[in-house]
Image (cartoon, helix red, strand yellow):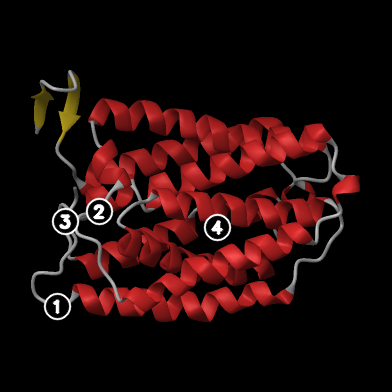
């Protein structure tokens, strides 16, 4: 159903699962078409300025441009970016604090002497694209669409499965098949944590920032030949515990998520 928002002067469409899936498919089509055209070798992403620009920054930024236009036309930005009310136990705030600490630890271990200004620029732009694009498409517009039909537990499950599914095609571009289940599992757990952070903070902006910085810290570590600290794996069990706590909170009467 279409309606005209007289205040914004933009076309608005009522949220639906179908529209959310179309945005998801559109983002993936742009991202993987860019990878195909540029001849991505997944295991070599970030080894130099050219692979960082063409295989990391460009596909994410092109996907972001599509999302900005599409969500603006739909008029979904407020619902994509904000939840009302916030939900979840206060102790769940330990998750973003721990993630921020690990990010700082990763950055502190970088060999900045091996980073050229151009590599730093394109890797930063790629991280911005990942944080904005992947969060917007899965824990933003997809959640808005899913909430039009499903209770919050299913919203979490489906949106997080779709976040994991973003990474399955990596095997086509060079990720060893044996590594794919491991990557999909970790992204599901990490995505659950990002969902919990959206709910307790009441905004998608915090997951966007943390996701982008997390990717950037790991990406730049790999680019400079530094092995990230194993402490990063502490995030995964904590993310699952926090996501369960938020979901249990949502099962209480009157605590179901509402889009702002």
Residue 40, horizontal then vertical, whole percent: 71, 41
Return the residue at label 3.
258
Task: Say if mark 2 contacts mark 3, CB within 8 Å.
Answer: yes
Residue 260, horizontal then vertical, whole percent: 19, 47
Q: Is residue 141 visible?
A: yes
Circle 3 — which element?
A: loop
Cα separation between marks 1 and 2: 17 Å
Residue at 48 percent across and 34 percent down: it is 64
Return the residue at label 4.
168
Which one is earlier in the sequence, the residue at label 1 or at label 3? 1
Circle 4 — which element?
A: helix
Cα separation between marks 4 and 2: 29 Å
Residue at 22 percent across and 65 percent down: it is 152
Task: Say if mark 4 contacts mark 2, CB within 8 Å.
Answer: no
Which one is earlier in the sequence, the residue at label 3 or at label 4? 4
Residue at 41 percent across and 70 percent down: it is 93
Question: Relative to the observer, which residue lies in front, 180 or 245?
Answer: 245
Q: In this rendering, is residue 70 above or below 143?
A: above
Residue 228, horizontal then vertical, whole percent: 76, 66
Q: In this rendering, is residue 250 above or below 126?
A: below
Residue at 72 percent across and 52 percent down: it is 219
**Image quadrant where residue 177 sits:** bottom right
Which one is earlier in the sequence, the residue at label 1 or at label 2? 2
Return the residue at label 1.
252
Q: Is residue 180 visible?
A: no
Q: Is residue 248 left or right of residue 2?
A: right
Cα separation between marks 2 and 3: 6 Å
How many residues crowd around disc 3 within 10 Å: few (fewer than 14), some, or many (20 or more)? some
Return the residue at label 2.
83
């Amino acid at each position: 159903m279409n309606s005209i928002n007289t205040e914004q002067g933009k076309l608005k469409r009522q949220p639906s699962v179908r529209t959310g899936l179309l945005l998801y498919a559109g983002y993936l089509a742009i991202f993987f078409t860019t990878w195909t055209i540029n001849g991505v070798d997944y295991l070599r992403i970030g080894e130099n300025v050219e692979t960082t620009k063409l295989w990391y920054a460009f596909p994410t930024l092109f996907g972001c441009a599509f999302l900005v236009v599409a969500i603006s036309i739909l008029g979904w930005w407020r619902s994509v970016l904000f939840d009302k009310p916030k939900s979840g136990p206060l102790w769940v705030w330990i998750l973003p604090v721990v993630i921020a600490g690990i990010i700082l630890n990763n950055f502190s271990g970088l060999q900045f002497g091996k980073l050229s200004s151009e590599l730093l620029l394109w890797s930063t732009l790629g991280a911005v694209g990942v944080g904005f694009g992947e969060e917007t498409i899965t824990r933003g517009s997809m959640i808005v669409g899913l909430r039009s039909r499903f209770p919050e537990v299913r919203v979490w499950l489906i949106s997080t499965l779709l976040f994991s599914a973003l990474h399955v095609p990596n095997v086509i571009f060079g990720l060893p098949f044996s590594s794919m289940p491991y990557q999909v599992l970790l992204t599901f757990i990490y995505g659950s944590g990002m969902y919990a952070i959206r709910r307790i903070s009441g905004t998608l902006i915090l997951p966007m920032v943390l996701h982008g910085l997390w990717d950037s810290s790991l990406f730049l570590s790999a680019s400079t030949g530094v092995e990230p600290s194993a402490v990063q794996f502490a995030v995964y069990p904590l993310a699952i515990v926090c996501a369960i706590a938020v979901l249990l909170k949502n099962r209480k009467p009157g605590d179901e998520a509402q889009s702002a």
